[in-house]
Image (cartoon, rainbow, N blue to C red):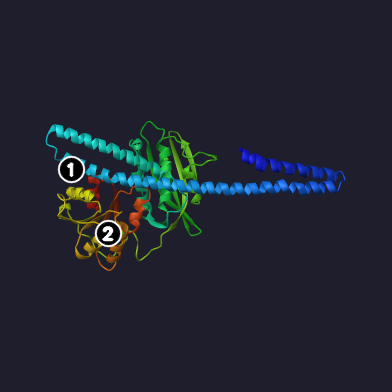
Amino acid sequence: MTRRTRDRILLPVASALLLVIIALSTAIAGLVWVPLVAGILALVPLGMAVHEIRQLIADSRSIIDEMSSIAERNEDVINSFSHKIREPLNNLVLLGSMLSETAASARQQELVETFVASTGTMVDVVNDLTMETAGNITFEKKGDIRFRLGPIIQDTIGLMKLNRSHEQSLILYDDKGEGETEYNGDPIIIKQILIDLLGAAISGSSGKVTVKIQAREAGERDGMQKVEFTLSTNNPVVFIGEGRQSLPLSGRLIRNSGGNWKEATAGSGSYFVFHINLRRADKVKHPAAASTLMQGLTGEKERKELKELSILLVEDNPINLRITQLMLEPLVRRIETARNGKEALDMFGTSKYDLILMDVQMPVMNGLMAADKIRGLEMSTRMHVPIIAITANAMLGDREQCLAVGMDDYISKPIDPELLIEKITALV
């Protein structure tokens, strides 16, 4: 109890209560003026206490707003740090990959391997920071985003793999076809729920933990679709627990999404079932997702070999641009470069490309706006050029932002060269 609460609230309330007792006692005794005076006097400390309670509530709201503002500023600092450190890290990773293929002597190979290992450790540290930030929560909606359930779950599993302490764990998504269903809402909430639950399922176990995720539609109510998620694991664990006054992140998010949950431990395993309410996406003529943008307009696309590709690389940092260029030049037929989204848009209108690699944060016109304008131009044609976002933005929600404007895929810096090649070949 604080001194302010005691002196300005409890003592006046106690005084008012004492005066009320005096008033009642004297009224029962048949007195007239004493109860009236005592009752009037009781209103004074009571009014003081009410005023102080209102002031205390106002101060508490001000403190909460200030704390929320501090949390948002801290998140901005972390996001900025993650972005700035990933840019040079990306160059180190790509240089290490190229140097490992050119090292001539055993001594050079040893030095390159040490360089690559040290860079990998730095990447792990940044990824751990990303995972910690992914667990933070602001209860504000991120926006009304069109999304498919399957990619959201798969991307969450990918985020969990960033954490080195989870390397021995196996997380599986059992997709029975529901992953292609499209919804409108905030997919970041689903990711935050799953990250919190998966962390609980994996933590505290010394052996290998297997977690299976399933999702299915379980009825409709008030225009909302009830979607049920099931997490089953071979690790006997308490995900949330019954009767907890202070719920963990996942519990608060599930309730805020109009859902509930149940969990049980049986033998050597546990399961957790929760549902949230989502809104099915309406069928539209101009879908935002690039993967469906030209659906029905083009026939079977002819597959191309990597060495046949013509690629447009859009990057404002000259060092990043040159290193990525050096990595791709031996692999593809032609690679052209643009320094911002405006240049990319102009080049797209005059040249033909098989794929575009698009940075996000650029001057003049950023990658999100450029991708959106390219997709707008394609609506009047029978063409579709895949766009992969290559960005230092790797925080929760960045992938959804890229896909929402029409990009086909997303890869965060530092780039894994093999993963980039895999994504390119999958799209062409």
In the picture, residue 7 is in which quadrant?
Answer: top right
Q: Which residue is mark 1?
A: 98
Mark 1 or 2: the one toward you: 2
- Between the C-alphas of marks 1 and 2, the distance is 28 Å
What percent of the width, then of the height, locates residue 108? 15, 34
Q: Quadrant of the N terminus?
A: top right
Instruction: Specify few, some or many for label 2: CA neighbours under 10 Å numbering under 14, 14-19, or 20 or more.
Output: many
Residue type indicated by callout 1? Met
**Residue 233 visible from this viewpoint:** no
Residue 362 horizontal side relative to residue 278, left or right: left
In the picture, residue 350 is in which quadrant?
Answer: bottom left
Q: Quadrant of the C terminus?
A: bottom left
Kindly give the residue lying farthest to the right in the view shown. Answer: 30
- Mark toward the start of the polypeptide (1 vs 2): 1
Query: Which residue corresponds to the image point at 36% horizontal and 53% vertical from the top-left?
Result: 400
Which structural element holds mark 2? helix
Which structural element holds mark 1? helix
Front residue of this view, candidates 270 and 131: 131
What percent of the width, then of the height, locates residue 149? 38, 52
Disc number for residue 207: none
Front residue of this view, candidates 420 and 285: 420
Residue type indicated by callout 2? Gly
Q: Which residue is mark 2?
A: 341
What percent of the width, then of the height, locates residue 227? 44, 52
What percent of the width, then of the height, locates residue 289? 33, 59
Q: Is residue 318 above or below residue 231?
A: below
